[in-house]
Image: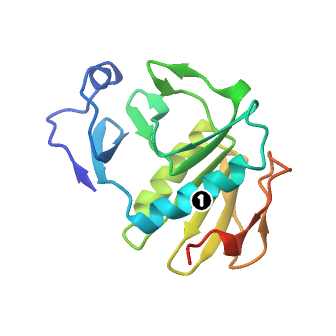
């Protein structure tokens, strides 16, 4: 992850006038622009396949499933915008403004790699908690494990990592994902 050299943090208003970054993912954390390389093939396969699996089980008129192609505004001051690997929204809860989403998804999925530091993971979870995201799934492709985090009293409570069984998002009871189907062959 690279940060752009800035003498001062970028504001929301300044950020809106900047050109979009091509072939990379841009997050802003407390006004600091962070550029990340595009996901590796395995990462994108996991997320795309999981998104397809969820889409097949929800009423698409009422639910939106998005993969890393939108900015999720956590706060405008200091500007913090995240790009989740996968987010599931009830359509009625989506608040779009200035081309970005300003409301919490009901589920976020992040595929983690050894390059993700604990500090980065905790920072991102704190941002998701501050927005009120009720459920986060951490996927660990290296160990083929999934950790479910549920928000209670503004804090995420973690499950034991699971390598088998079914994932059933709390707010989407008709969705059931067999953990074994998440990982590419």
Compared with 182, 36 (above or below) is: above
Determine which residue is flagged by label 1: 49
Where residue 160 sits: x, y (%)?
Answer: 70, 74
Residue beneath the point at 38% across and 58% down: 39
Classify mark 1: residues with Cα within 10 Å, few (<14), some (14-19) or many (20+).
some
Which quarter of the image is occupied by the N terminus? bottom left
Residue beneath the point at 46% across and 36% down: 70
> Element type at marker 1?
helix
The answer to whether residue 10 shows anywhere in this view is: yes
Which quarter of the image is occupied by the C terminus? bottom right
77 sits to left or right of 157: left
Residue beneath the point at 25% across and 33% down: 9
- Nearer the observer, 48 or 139: 48
The answer to whether residue 160 shows anywhere in this view is: no
Q: Residue furthest right?
A: 173
Where residue 128 sits: x, y (%)?
Answer: 56, 45
Where residue 90 sits: x, y (%)?
Answer: 72, 34
């Amino acid at each position: 992850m690279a940060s752009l050299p800035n003498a001062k943090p970028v504001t929301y208003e300044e950020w809106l006038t900047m050109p979009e970054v091509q072939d990379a993912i841009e997050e802003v954390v407390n006004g600091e622009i962070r550029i990340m390389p595009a996901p590796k093939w395995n990462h994108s396969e996991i997320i795309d396949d999981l998104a397809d699996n969820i889409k097949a089980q929800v009423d698409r008129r009422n639910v939106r499933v998005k993969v890393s192609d939108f900015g999720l505004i956590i706060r405008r001051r200091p500007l913090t915008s995240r790009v989740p690997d996968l987010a599931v929204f009830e359509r009625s809860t989506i608040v779009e403004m200035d081309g970005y989403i300003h409301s919490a998804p009901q589920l976020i999925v992040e595929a983690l790699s050894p390059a993700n530091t604990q500090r980065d993971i905790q920072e991102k979870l704190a941002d998701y908690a501050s927005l009120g995201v009720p459920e986060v799934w951490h996927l660990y492709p290296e160990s083929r494990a999934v950790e479910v985090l549920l928000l209670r009293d503004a804090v995420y409570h973690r499950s034991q990592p699971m390598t088998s069984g079914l994932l059933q998002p709390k707010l989407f009871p008709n969705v059931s994902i067999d953990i074994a189907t998440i990982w590419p062959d």
